[in-house]
Image: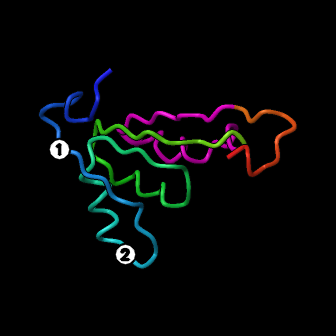
């Protein structure tokens, strides 16, 4: 297994950015999503920006166990040319307090 993203993808440029919130202008949010070749993000309301991703881009969506059956985000990307991959978390162990399940 490669030790770093640079070793795994020697010609790639890695840019790490937080998901912009309501204080970031919409045009900046669109620019960030449109410039990504690969995007890893948790699911959430910001996911609507996936519509602005480039054809053939890869979208990796982190899905918590409790939302495994929620169809919302795949519905957004179904009509686009984005390669949408949902990454589901493991089922929490029974009997654990909710804080320990996160």
**Residue 54 location in percent, x, y?**
27, 46
x and y, in percent, of residue 15 in the image: 25, 51
Q: Residue at x 27, y 34 (%)?
A: 4
Q: Identify the image quadrant of the N terminus.
A: top left
Q: At x 59% / y 42%, what residue is drawn?
A: 63
Q: Is residue 26 above or below residue 87?
A: below
Disc 2: CA contacts within 10 A as few (<14), some (14-19) or many (>=20): few
Residue 4's disc is none
Please tell me which residue lies in front, 48 or 32: 32
Disc 1 secondary structure class = loop
Report the span colored magenta: 67-90
Q: What residue is disc 1 on? A: 13
Measure the C-alpha gap from mark 1 to mark 2. 23 Å
Residue at 52% x, 35% y: name it: 86
Hey, which quadrant is residue 6 in on the image? top left
**Res. 8 image quadrant:** top left
Image-based side of 3 in relation to 45, left or right: left
Q: Quadrant of residue 11?
A: top left
**Outermost top residue:** 1
Position of residue 45 measured from the top left corner of the image (x, y, whole percent): 54, 60
Who comes first in sequence, dot 1 or dot 2?
Answer: 1
| 50 is within the stretch colored magenta | no
User: In the image, is residue 27 above or below residue 51?
Assistant: below
Count all numbered tags in the image, as a single digit: 2
Choose between 16 and 22: the one closer to the eye: 16
> Residue at 50% of width from left, 48% of height from top?
76
Q: Position of residue 58 (x, y in %)?
A: 35, 37
- Number of residues whose C-alpha sits closer than 10 Å to that of mark 1, classed few (under 14), some (14–19) or many (20 or more): few
The residue pinned by badge 2 equals: 24
The answer to whether mark 1 and mark 2 are in CB contact below 8 A is: no
- Secondary structure beneath label 2: loop
76 falls in the magenta region: yes
């Amino acid at each position: 297994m490669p030790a770093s993203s640079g070793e795994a993808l020697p010609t790639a440029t890695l840019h790490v950015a937080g998901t912009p919130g309501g204080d970031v202008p919409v045009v900046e949010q669109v620019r960030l999503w449109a410039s990504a070749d690969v995007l890893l993000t948790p699911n959430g309301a910001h996911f609507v920006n996936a519509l602005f991703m480039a054809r053939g881009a890869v979208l990796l969506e982190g899905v918590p166990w409790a939302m495994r059956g929620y169809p919302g985000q795949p519905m957004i990307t179904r009509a686009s040319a984005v390669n949408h991959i949902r990454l589901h978390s493991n089922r929490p162990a029974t009997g654990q307090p909710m804080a320990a399940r996160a």
